[in-house]
Image (tube, rainbow, N blue to C red):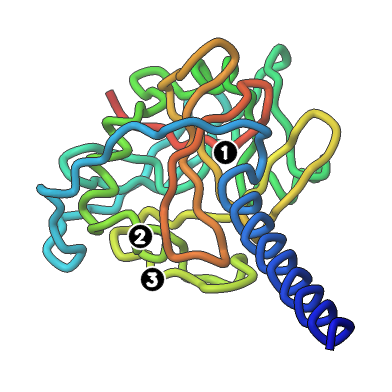
Amino acid sequence: MVYSFANTIKGHALTFAKLLTAIFTLTFATTLSSCSGSSTAPSVNQSSATSASSASSQMGSFIDARDGRVYKTVVIAGKTWMAQNLNYSSAADTTWCYNDSVGNCATFGRLYEYTTALAACPTSWHLPDTTEWNAMTAIVGDTSIAGTKLKAKNALWNTNTGTDAIGFAALPGGFYNGTQFSAKNTLGEWWTSTSTKTFYAYRRVIAGYSSSLNYFDCFQSIALSVRCVKD
C-alpha cells in the first residue's frame, strides 16, 4: 500500500511538472520571442474601437525618393501607413536581410536595430509610437483578435493565415538578435518609437500560432521590422 501510494504521488508530481513546463514554454514563446526581457505594456483603450467592416481605408502607393522603391500604402483612421515593411538601408545603417538573403528583403523588408529604425523612414514619414499603433489597431477591435485581422492573406504565415481586414498586410519577417536569424514565417515584430527604459523600447508582435496582437518591450539592439506613418 505504501509503495502504491508513493507511486501515485510520484505520478501526480510528474504530471504537474509537465503542465508547468508546457505553460512556461507557451509563455516564453509568446512574450519573449526575440527579447530576454519584458515589462508592463502601455494601456490600450478599446472603448472607441470600430468594427473592421465600418473602417474607412484607402489604398495607394508611395515612391521612396532615396532609392526609387515603391511601397503600397493604406489610410487607416485618418493616418497613411505603409502597407509593406520598410526595405531601405544606407551604407551606415545597421540593418539586415533575413539570413542575409536579398530575396527575403524583397518579400519581408529589412530588419532594423531600434536606433536605426528611428531615422529609417523617408522624409515626411516617421516610425509610429504606441499611441499611433493603438489608434490604428483599435479599428479592428480588441487586441485578442487584432492579429488575425492585420495578418496578410497569404501562405507566408506558416499557421493561421489572416483576413487582412483593413489592408495592413502584416508579414512574418522574424527577427535578428545579433548572432542568429529566427522566426521567419512565424512571427511579425515591429518597432514603435516609444522607449521604455535604458536600452529598451516597445514592439508590436503578431504570432502565426495566435490571433492576438501584443505589446512587449525589447532590447534596442534586436533587429525587427519597420512600418512608417506619414507625418
Q: Nearer the viewer, mark 2 or mark 1?
A: 2
Left or right of 224 in this view: 14: right
Q: Write down the residue under mark 3.
A: 163
Q: Which quadrant of the view contains residue 166?
A: bottom left
Badge 3: residue crowd in 10 Å (few <14, some 14–19, many ≥20): some
Q: Are the residues flagged by discs 3 and 2 in contact, CB closer than 8 Å?
A: no
- Disc 2 + disc 1, Cβ < 8 Å: no
Picture coordinates of residue 42 (x, y %)? 33, 32
Badge 1 amino acid = Ser
Instruction: Judge the density around disc 1: few (<14), some (14-19), many (≥20) Cα neighbours within 10 Å.
Output: many
> Residue 111 at x, y = what percent?
65, 35
Quadrant in which the C terminus appears: top left
N-terminal of the two: label 3 or label 2? 2
8 and 89: which is toward the camera: 8
C-alpha distance separating marks 3 and 1: 20 Å
Check disc 2 and give the amino acid type: Ser
Residue that appears at 35% across and 60% down: 144
Quarter location, residue 157: bottom right
Residue that label 2 marks: 144
**Residue at 81% over, 73% down:** 10
In the picture, residue 90 is in which quadrant? top right
Q: Earlier in the sequence, mark 3 or mark 1?
A: 3
Residue matched to label 1: 225
